[in-house]
Image: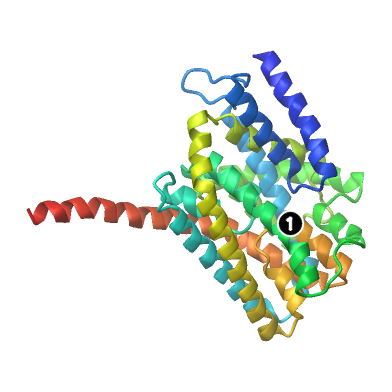
Amino acid sequence: MLLRWSGLILLTAVASVGLELLSVPSAALFAGLVIAAALALAGLAPRAHGDRPPMPRPFGLAAQGVLGVYIGTMVSPDVLTGLGSAWVPVVVVAVGTLALSVGGGALLGLHRKVDPLTGSLALVAGGASGLVALTRELGGDERMVAVIQYVRVGLVTVTMPIVATVVFNAHTGSGSGGGISASVLGTDGIGPQLWGLLLTAVCMGVGITLGRVVRLPAAGLLGPLVLTVIAELTGIAGSAAVPLVLVTLGYAIIGWQAGLGFTMDSLRAIGRVLPYAVGLIIAIGVGSAGLGVLLSLWTGESMFDSYLATTPGGIYAVLAAAAAAGSNITFVVAAQIVRVLLMLFIAPAAARLYQRFRNRNVVAEPEMADSTT
């Protein structure tokens, strides 16, 4: 078993470095997912012990907590003030994107290979890594969600520069987003990372405990996220930055959780669903672009900036494109973060409500049929 774990860790590390060089978002998560799935299908992955999954639950919970704190550190007062008086339009458009996502997910959930909860979470346009992390907690199929979410992020990341160049005549291939990247990613020094380590430990310990007490959905992710956002907005967090090694390890663990559960049957099922999912992803992208037009007319921001602000995913690619094109970065970053937070907090609840509604209808139909016979 030790040899299997060593092989998984080594191959994931190598793949992560390669994907980082290719600027793949959340490279360690994607690498962990692909490597773990490949080893599982080849019969070379770490095995489960009885009814317990291969990945011990405490490790998965810790990974969710690290990711929650990491996402929370993006919500700084300086970033959010970039919205100025555009708060209402941005929130309305973000809710519109959420509605498109959940609607698309509901349609995907009609496929016989996809349950309603999994379908809804798989197409939520924001926080792909966070959604993969909390899918297991909510009872969905994290393998399906992970694959479809990364297809979504990949499509958005690939098509965004094309749309920017062809439609808006904007140049996104040069320039550097280093200033905004350092601020958002929190990689601007050892001091902030040491303070971030303490912040991570406190927000994880207190956030997960309180989240369970108040029965917060996916408390492992959302509990620490809530506390970190509060710490950021009140100034307690200061310049804290979650150590990169913890973030990378957290991403890898979340990827392993999903990947180790792959079987040939699950792979075939995902293959059958993927064409429908891609069609819905494209439809959501087109709908989000329409919301970008509305946002531009409402706020007076340029069409290109509004397009970047409403792009349904690929937040790091969006920031790089905004920096290279000389866009209103603070507005784009703030709008994107508002979208991610709304998706992570509201989408799981909306998915659960839809699942309950559909399950009631499924139960009610046989009862109605029996009463008419």
**Residue 224 in the image: x percent, y percent?**
64, 48
- Is residue 136 in view? no
Residue at horizontal 16 percent and vertical 52 percent from the top: 367
Residue at the left extreme, as displayed: 373
Q: Nearer the viewer, residue 150 or 359?
A: 150
Residue 113 lies in quadrant = top left
**Residue 175 in the image: x percent, y percent?**
92, 62
Q: Is residue 333 above or below residue 245?
A: below
Count of number-bearing discs: 1
**Residue 364 in the image: x percent, y percent?**
22, 54
Residue at horizontal 51 percent and vertical 67 percent from the top: 99
Q: Residues within 10 Å of mark 1 (few under 14, many from 20)?
A: few
Q: Nearer the viewer, residue 237 or 145?
A: 145
Amino acid type at circle 1 is Val
Residue 176 lies in quadrant = bottom right
Read off the residue under disc 1.
158
Residue at horizontal 82 percent and vertical 64 percent from the top: 321
Residue 249 lies in quadrant = top right
Q: Nearer the viewer, residue 4 or 40?
A: 40
Q: Is residue 293 above or below residue 346?
A: below
Q: Is residue 352 above or below residue 146?
A: below
Q: Nearer the viewer, residue 98 or 263?
A: 263
- Colour mapping used in the image: rainbow
Residue at horizontal 57 percent and vertical 54 percent from the top: 278
- Is residue 195 in view? yes
**Residue 111 in the image: x percent, y percent?**
42, 50
Q: Quadrant of the N terminus?
A: top right
Tag 1, which secondary structure?
Answer: helix
220 relative position to 313: left or right: left
